[in-house]
Image (tube, rainbow, N blue to C red):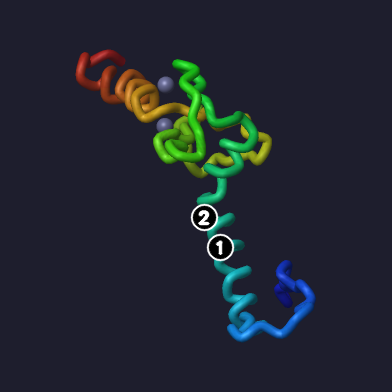
Amino acid sequence: MSPRSPYNRKAGRPRPTKLPTDEEIAKEVRGINAAGKSGINYRELSLDLHGMICAKCAREFTAANRHELTVHHIDGNDKNNPTDGSNWENLCNHCHEAEHSRGRLGDYLRGDD
Ligand SMILES: [Zn+2]
Ligand SMILES: [Zn+2]
């Protein structure tokens, strides 16, 4: 495998700061790939697909508070990350907590099932 740089922009004018070396770029690209494999990028993908809005209470988010929006896994399996977003739901902190306490902890505490 030879990682190709997506940042192969031409240096129009010489810059005083040093440009990243091929090795540095390759390292960064590998980092991005690793993040994708471990599922870290699904958050961005889900926000992109479903929009920055809570699926339960319809609270809208902006770039300023988007970190309060959580990507919830509908089937509860955070390893299940189809890129069409079918297992993701964007929930605000509040709704996300409610979703989890209702599904598992709630049942557990009540002794249901
Ligand atoms: Zn909500
Ligand atoms: Zn969740």
Lateral position of residue 18 relative to residue 56, left or right: right
The disc labelled 1 sits on which kind of residue? Ala
Mark 2: secondary structure: loop
The C terminus lies in quadrant: top left
Tell which of 103 and 30 is nearer to you: 30
Residue 67, disc:
none
**What residue is rendered at 61% in x and 42% in y?**
45
Tell which of 98 and 105 is nearer to you: 98
**What residue is rendered at 62% in x and 34% in y?**
85
The disc labelled 2 sits on which kind of residue? Ser
Residue 69 vertical position relative to residue 98 in the rendered view, above or below: below
Q: On the image, which quarter does residue 81 sit in?
A: top right
Dots 2, 1 in contact, CB < 8 A: yes
The N terminus lies in quadrant: bottom right
Residue 61 location, x and y as percent?
Answer: 49, 30
Residue 47 location, x and y as percent?
Answer: 57, 36
Lateral position of residue 5 relative to residue 59, left or right: right
Disc 2 CB within 8 Å of nearest ligand 2 atom = no
Which residue is under mark 2?
38
Lateral position of residue 17 relative to residue 94, left or right: right
**What residue is rendered at 21% in x and 14% in y?**
110
**What residue is rendered at 20% in x and 19% in y?**
109
Which residue is under mark 1?
34
Residue 35 location, x and y as percent?
Answer: 54, 58
Categorize mark 1 by other alpha carbons within 10 Å: few (<14), some (14-19), many (20+). Answer: few
Mark count: 2
Residue 79 location, x and y as percent?
Answer: 51, 44
* Disc 2 from disc 1: Cα separation: 6 Å
Q: Quadrant of ligand 1?
A: top left
Residue 100 vertical position relative to residue 68 in the rendered view, above or below: above
Mark 1: secondary structure: helix
Categorize mark 2 by other alpha carbons within 10 Å: few (<14), some (14-19), many (20+). Answer: few
